[in-house]
Image (cartoon, rainbow, N blue to C red):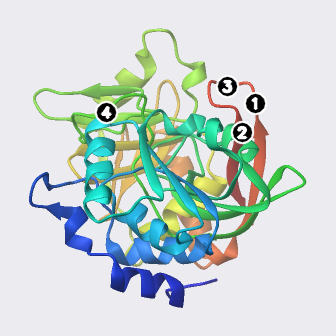
Amino acid sequence: MTTTVAPAVAQAAAKVPERHYTHNEARGATIHRTNPTFVRRDLSFLDVEAGMRVLEIGTGSGLTGGLLAELVGRTGHVVSLDIDPFLTRWANHIHDARGIGNIRCHAVNGTDGFPEKAPFHRLGAWCTPPRLPKTWVEQVNDGGLIVATLPIAPVPNLVVGATIRITDGRPYVEQVFPGAYIETVGSPRSTFAVPPRWVDWENRVPATSWISVAWRDQDDWKNSAAHAILDRLLDPGHTEQYQGETIDWSSLRLWLAATGTRLTMTELAEDVPGLGHSTRHSVAVVQEDGTILADSAGSGSLTVLRGWLAAWDDAGRPGLDAYTPTLVPDMDTDVPGWDLRLSR
């Protein structure tokens, strides 16, 4: 797997003034930006060459667009999309201020792509859609590449990066790598305290807390079960400490996404995630520090969670390279496309 920055990307980074985009004096600093190290890594995966047409999903500060414009050269063209018109307007202005004329930014829903300028040789997504959209695949040339982070389970924040090759009109995963970008949304976000997708109940007073259950289609129209089990976790009937070695959270997340059923994710306090199992009447989650919370000492979900943790330990706490990625078609949804799943 490529881990170093491609020479062409390093050369582009040397020419594109980073702070002109991320901390522009006229616009101010933008929070919608990615660590430059990851920007250069993911652009290396995208393998952009001069003369290519590139679709970028997620304009952000405009820095990645500026790098892409440098990579495609005067004979290429970049289309950049973002749901937030404030970002696209300013990015267009900042690009123009540098004399860059081979990129245009548009305020639209990026999951729809941009058919007016298709097909593209490359598509880079600096955001996470609910699945690989069919529209993206349809708008990339045969032999072209897509680089994106995709969910590996239907709960928030369980994602990996993927490079996807289009062959005979179908997507095939070439490699996966650690990575995460913010989730796609249908309108600009005013808060980042709660994920915009797959949250089944949330509290905003006295403090923010939320829960996501992968079995949400079995809950009622009031989300009664999700509400009830979140309340049980906020006032747990049982607490214990995981007795194994210090938890490798990145490894455990992959294991539970690949092997867990009735997967449940919570955040009971800011930046304190929990993962585990739940039913309509029981719940148990483990937090990153090894604290296990459950509805009771005899909880059925607690028994399941203990079994998962033991199996993960017995398997040697595998990393991402131990899994096989597969794209599973799911066209009967509001975003038709392919779900990315990992298996061992």
Query: Which structural element holds mark 4?
Result: loop
**Disc 1 + disc 2, Cβ < 8 Å:** yes
Q: Secondary structure at mark 3?
A: loop
Mark 1 vs mark 2: which is more N-terminal? Answer: 2
Q: Amino acid at mark 1?
A: Met
Q: Can residue 235 be seen in this snapshot?
A: no
**56 and 328: which is toward the camera:** 56
User: Image check: 73 left or right of 241?
Assistant: right
Q: Earlier in the sequence, mark 1 or mark 4?
A: 4
The residue at 61%/50% (across/down) is: 260
Task: Specify the amino acid type for callout 4.
Answer: Pro
The residue at 36%/42% (across/down) is 266
Residue, disc 1: 331
Q: Is residue 263 above or below residue 315?
A: above
In the rendered image, residue 96, in percent from the top left (x then y), is placed at 31, 56
Q: Quadrant of the N terminus?
A: bottom right
Q: Residue tagged by mark 3?
A: 333
> Which residue position is annotated with label 4?
188
**Label 2's element?**
helix
Tag 3 and tag 1, C-beta contact below 8 Å: yes
Give how far across and how far down residue 284 sits, in percent.
42, 44
Answer with mark 3 or mark 2, whichever residue precedes in sequence.
2
Residue at the spot of label 2: 134
Q: What residue is shown at x 69% (from left), y 32% (from top)?
A: 336
Q: Name the one closer to the observer, 8 or 6.
A: 8
Give the label, 1 or 2, closer to the camera: 2
Q: Looking at the picture, which amino acid does disc 2 mark?
A: Lys
Between marks 4 and 3, how big is the CA–CA gap? 22 Å
Circle 2 packing at 10 Å, graded few (<14), some (14-19), many (20+), is many
Q: Is residue 173 above or below residue 106?
A: below
The CA span between labels 1 and 4 is 26 Å
